[in-house]
Image (cartoon, rainbow, N blue to C red):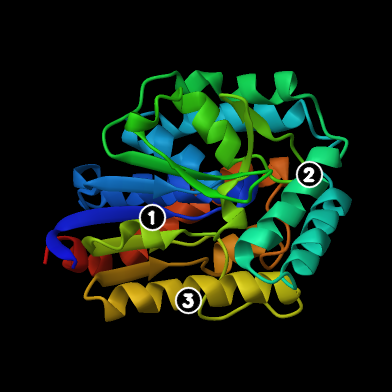
Amino acid sequence: MTDSSRRAVVLSGGGLLGAAWQAGLLRGLTEAGVDLAGADTVIGTSAGSLSGASFTMGGDPQELLRILDQAVASVESFVTPERFGRMFEIMAQAAAEDSPEAGRRRIGQAALEAETIAEADFGPKFSFLGEKWPDGFVCTAVEATSGAFQAWASGSNVPLFRAVASSCAAPLVFPAVDIDGRRYLDGGLNSNLNSELAREFGRILAVSCLPVTTPVPDAGPMADSMAAQVAAELEERRAAGSQVELIEPGPEFLDVTDGGRNYMVRANVQPAFEAGLRQALGAAQRVSEMWTA
């Protein structure tokens, strides 16, 4: 059963530029009068865990962009198209496994064997978030060995910054994050959006950094598969009675990300944020109508 009085913001994965674009959208919608701060929950996956945590904490988005730029600058040699290409190659192979969980285990094994930066150099980059959880915030991860999906929240007894780090640990690119003796990877391995976590909420704002209704030409089978999964999830939410508004990349953000093919270009962080601000102006009315219905 969905509760029409309960509202959720669900933020997808989408790399460095996705986090910046989402930060712009959230700021722009708020400035346009949409009371997103009144959400009962904000659910973030990967990039969405960063933008979502910052937003729910009342953080300055420009400060977030500065921190993101510095963090990526220090690991830029590891953040290459080749590494992401290998990640998507492994994900495509994992899709042939007997179950999604078995596929995630296969990815986890490859990730644990991969050469990446040291975890000691990765996790602390998220320390600016602190340990205390903002009310209603949830982020996602996948346990590398078992393939089990994990939703972190205030009751998980995990410092916020470590939970967000685990959600952003893209396999074969960044290291798995140790939490209580278990190693965790990017929550996008389960779903790029994970809107299933909002199944009880009657009104849902879903923000996808990847095109959903109009997939990018030549983006590859994994991008198409991820888009199809998100579309199916949102249809399930609607069929269960939720009102859902989807914001997906507009032309400006697609241009900034090379047509949705590269989300890790440091020089485009500010343009991605500004694209989100401007796109929010066009989306504000329809989002507000759903949010206040």
| Residue 101 placement: quadrant | bottom right
**Quadrant housing the N terminus:** bottom left
Q: Earlier in the sequence, mark 3 or mark 1?
A: 1
Marking on residue 116 = none
| Left or right position of 67 against 112 | left
Residue tagged by mark 1?
A: 10
The answer to whether marks 3 and 1 mark residues whose Cβ atoms lie closer than 8 Å is no
Q: Earlier in the sequence, mark 2 or mark 1?
A: 1
Label 1 Cα crowd, 10 Å radius (few <14 / some 14-19 / many 20+)? many
- Amino acid type at image mark 3: Ala
Residue tagged by mark 2?
A: 111
What distance separates the C-alpha of mark 3 from that of mark 1?
14 Å
| Label 2 vs label 1, nearer the camera | 2
Total residue callouts:
3
- Amino acid type at image mark 2: Ala
| Left or right position of 235 against 84 | left
265 up-or-down from 189: above or below? above
Q: Nearer the viewer, residue 188 or 25?
A: 188
What distance separates the C-alpha of mark 2 from that of mark 3?
27 Å
Residue 108 visible from this viewpoint: yes
Q: Nearer the viewer, residue 37 or 148?
A: 148
Q: Nearer the viewer, residue 205 or 107?
A: 107
The answer to whether marks 2 and 1 mark residues whose Cβ atoms lie closer than 8 Å is no
Across and down, in percent, residue 243 comes to 24, 72
| Left or right position of 72 against 193 | right
Label 3 Cα crowd, 10 Å radius (few <14 / some 14-19 / many 20+)? some
Marking on residue 231 = 3
- The kind of secondary structure element at disc 1 is strand
155 up-or-down from 148: above or below? above
- The kind of secondary structure element at disc 2 is helix
- Amino acid type at image mark 1: Val
What distance separates the C-alpha of mark 2 from that of mark 1?
26 Å
